[in-house]
Image (cartoon, rainbow, N blue to C red):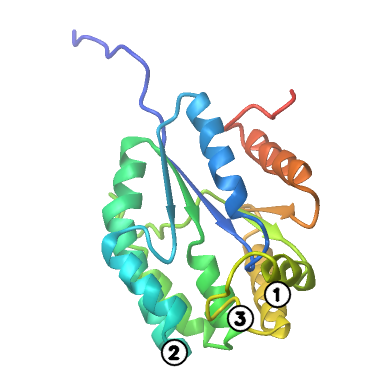
């Protein structure tokens, strides 16, 4: 009779993305969630898009600062995403790590699709091309296990940005652009409601943090803060 395996079963990797228009306040909550997972004994990878690898960071600089048309923006975003998936995200998930990513594909649909008015069918094609063939199941379309969507009125986000720093070429766009981007996020959430956790990020920092904690507790991944 073969000996039975013993020990703790390997932990399943988790892929969590953070989304929202510029000024939504998402980035300030990523490290707090990372620490909560570390305190729970999980290995963490914190990364971002555009970026996350040396190649993708070079593409990020182009995207944020160089003038280009929406198709070029989309192609650069997906090129960096493919390298990011192959080099960072997939290996981390295979190890059983928790990956926290500041933006992912939803941002491309929101910014280039809704914001720029670029063809959503082309973006869907690029999504399938870039985000499949990475795992044991070649048909698996890699997307986050949950997307924490920081939803805020564009006017509130603009007021926050005006006091923060010199804007990049996206942050400098008019409020009407961000209204379209916000609608793009709402459309993505409506199409995949099980994946999205909507956070009302117009509230103060403590209330936003409590909403993020509740979203993790609801999925059984972390104990809710204060419980």
Q: Residue at x 67, y 43 (%)?
A: 212
Q: Marks 1 and 2, how far apart in space?
A: 24 Å
Residue shown at the point (52%, 24%) measured from the top left: 40
Q: Can the viewer see residue 133 in this picture?
A: no
Disc assigned to residue 67 = 2
From what the image shows, is residue 117 above or below residue 21?
Answer: below
Q: Is 128 in front, or is 106?
A: 106
Q: Which residue is mark 1?
A: 183
Quarter of image, res 43 = top left
Identify the secondary structure beneath mark 3: loop
Q: Secondary structure at mark 2?
A: loop
Mark 3 in CB contact with mark 2 (< 8 angstroms): no
Q: Is residue 8 left or right of residue 101?
A: left
Residue 23: x and y in percent read 66, 65
Task: List x then y, in percent, for residue 194.
Answer: 63, 52
Q: Which mark is residue 129?
A: none
Residue 172, which numbered label? Answer: 3
Q: Earlier in the sequence, mark 3 or mark 2?
A: 2
Q: Which secondary structure lies at badge 1?
A: helix
> In this image, 7 relative to 122: left or right?
left
Residue 43, visible in the rendered structure = yes
Mark 1 or mark 3, whichever is nearer to me: 3
Of labels 1 and 3, earlier in sequence is 3
Question: Relative to residue 63, is residue 211 depicted above or below?
Answer: above
Quarter the N terminus occupies: top left
């Amino acid at each position: 009779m073969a000996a039975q395996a013993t020990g703790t079963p390997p932990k399943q990797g988790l892929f969590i993305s953070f989304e929202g228009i510029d000024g939504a306040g998402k980035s300030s909550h990523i490290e707090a969630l990372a620490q909560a997972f570390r305190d729970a004994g999980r290995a963490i990878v914190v990364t971002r898009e555009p970026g996350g690898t040396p190649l993708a960071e070079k593409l990020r600089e182009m995207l944020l600062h160089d003038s280009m048309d929406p198709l070029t923006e989309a192609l650069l975003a997906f090129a960096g995403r493919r390298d990011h998936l192959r080099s960072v995200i997939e290996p981390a998930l295979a190890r059983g790590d928790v990956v926290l990513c500041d933006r992912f594909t939803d941002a491309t649909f929101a910014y280039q699709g809704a914001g720029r008015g670029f063809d959503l069918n082309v973006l869907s094609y690029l999504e399938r091309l870039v985000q499949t063939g990475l795992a044991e199941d070649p048909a698996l379309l890699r997307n986050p296990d949950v997307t924490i969507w920081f939803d805020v009125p564009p006017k509130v986000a603009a007021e926050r940005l005006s006091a923060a720093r010199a804007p990049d070429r996206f942050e400098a766009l008019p409020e009407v652009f961000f209204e379209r981007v916000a609608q793009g996020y709402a459309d993505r959430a409506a199409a995949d409601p099980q994946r999205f956790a909507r956070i009302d990020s117009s509230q103060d920092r403590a209330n936003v943090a409590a909403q993020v904690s509740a979203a993790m507790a609801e999925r059984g991944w972390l104990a809710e803060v204060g419980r």
